[in-house]
Image (tube, rainbow, N blue to C red):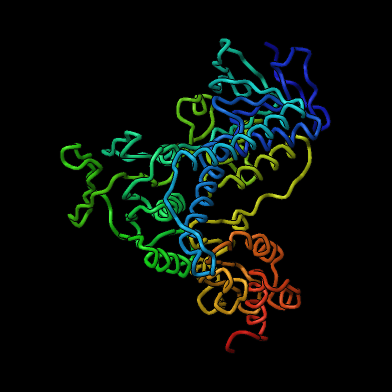
Amino acid sequence: MGAAPEREGGRAVAEADGDNVVDVLILGAGSGGYACALRAAQLGLSVALVEQAKLGGTCLHVGCIPTKALLHAAEIADATREADSFGVLAKFDGIDAAGVLGYADGVVSRLFKGLTGLVKSRGIRVVEGRGTLTGPREVTVEGPHGPVTLTGRDVVLATGSAPRLLPGIEIDGSRVLTSDDALRLDRVPSSAIVLGGGVIGCEFASVWRSFGADVTIVEALPRLLPPEDAASSAALERAFRRRGITSRTGTSVTAVTTASDDDGGGVVVTLSDDTELRADVLLVAVGRVPRTDGLGYAEQGVTLDRGFVTVDDHCRTGVDGVWAVGDIVPGLQLAHRGFQQGIFVAEQIAGLSPRPIDERGIPRVTYSRPEVASVGLTEEQAKEEYGDDAVTTLTYDLAGNGRSQILRTQGFVKLVRQVDGPVVGVHLVGERVGELIGEAQLVYGWEAHPDDVAPLVHAHPTQHEAIGEAFLALAGKPLHTHS
């Protein structure tokens, strides 16, 4: 095994030591890892990508893609139930769980095939197996054909995350589930308790309710989606209540037991107020933890904080030539954040000077019914940063938006602005509003003032018009709102 390649003018000079010495050695092939690999290869660097499971990681196989496929199936179920209200004659006969899983698997399979082909076409070496950091720039992989040691001029840690477990709650994969288990559930539960009112919990609650289950969400904090603007959380709770989803906020779980078949089966959940809830299944959706344990990070000098890798604003660890991206880095655990960080790191390794990522400018979407989307600061955060008197807000109700009326969705566009300054936060609630977050992100990144956006022409009838109307009102020119 040779030494790591030396630097020459910001680029790598690979040694004639075979494929086991590369410019960029990436541990983990999820959104952050494969994005880094593709961009590095595009920039002319040699790349090796180590993955224990499959290319695409959590997002593609047990996260973003399959969950959104289930949510789309749930949308179709609701549309079928409500078809007669649109003058369409249709009958809802139930859910074929195997058929739904087959549909989701088909989507994943096609994307996986495309990603595999793309990685191969870029000349990226994929090494299968469990990788461990065994030197500052060395990874040893225990794979199907025995161990192999790889060396990189730069090493990128991108090992992702796993569902967070709680002490005292035993996961059995059938009645007590993680989100991974819930994605493979071969039946529609008759009833479900969702422990955790964050993004994952709310999305599964929405799916199961659309599929016909009775659903209760238990959240220890005072409201659902705690990181979102309080108005968005309140709107989602109201919408869930109308759909028959019960939210028990400000409540924790003290005990979980599984009932015998003679006693009706399912699970019994005891809450902090001594209430007992019984359901067919319990989903434990209390967040995700970084996959860093036992991978040699600390042993090689990489600083960890509660399992997360400590990095600077350029994704550099404290070890020279070692970087970290994605869910193992403190902050939003979002696939598109990891993806962008991967590109950012690849460009730095190649000697470019990309602009650091603005964490506040990363869009956030909860794909429930209704959807919740946001970018920038909440009203509370803005007031904490700038002062109560320096912040103003405007909320435009989707009741005034033609397309939203056609879709029969309720919700709003909320703008958070510095007085006489730019808009620093955009918050959306309603069906399909996740598709509007791109414009909201541009507004935030542009540091746009209301007068900058108000003259823009929005197609009619679209939900995008709601953003335009909100900015017209904020600019003092309300047309479809009361001044």
Where residue 361 appears, x then y in whole percent? Answer: 63, 58
Q: Quadrant of the C terminus?
A: bottom right
Residue positioned 66% across, 34% down in the render: 34
Q: Out of 444 and 382, give the one closest to the viewer.
A: 444
The residue lying toward the viewer, choosing from 121 and 158, is: 121
Most extreme residue toward the right, as rendered?
A: 9
Left or right: 49, with 411 as reference point: right
Side (left or right) of 105 relative to 17: left
Determine if residue 392 is in view: no
Q: Using the image, determine if residue 469 lies above or below residue 106.
A: below
**Residue lying at 66% horizontally and 75% vertically, measured from the top left:** 421
Residue 1 seen in the figure: yes
Image vertical order of residue 119 relative to residue 424, above or below: above
- The quadrant the N terminus occupies is top right
Choose top left, top right, bottom left or bottom right for residue 480: bottom right
Picture residue at 32% right of the left edge, 39% below the top: 176
- Residue 165 position, x and y percent, is 36, 39
Residue 307: x and y in percent read 45, 36
Instruction: Answer left or right for 171 relative to 39.
Output: left
In front of the other: 385 or 476: 476
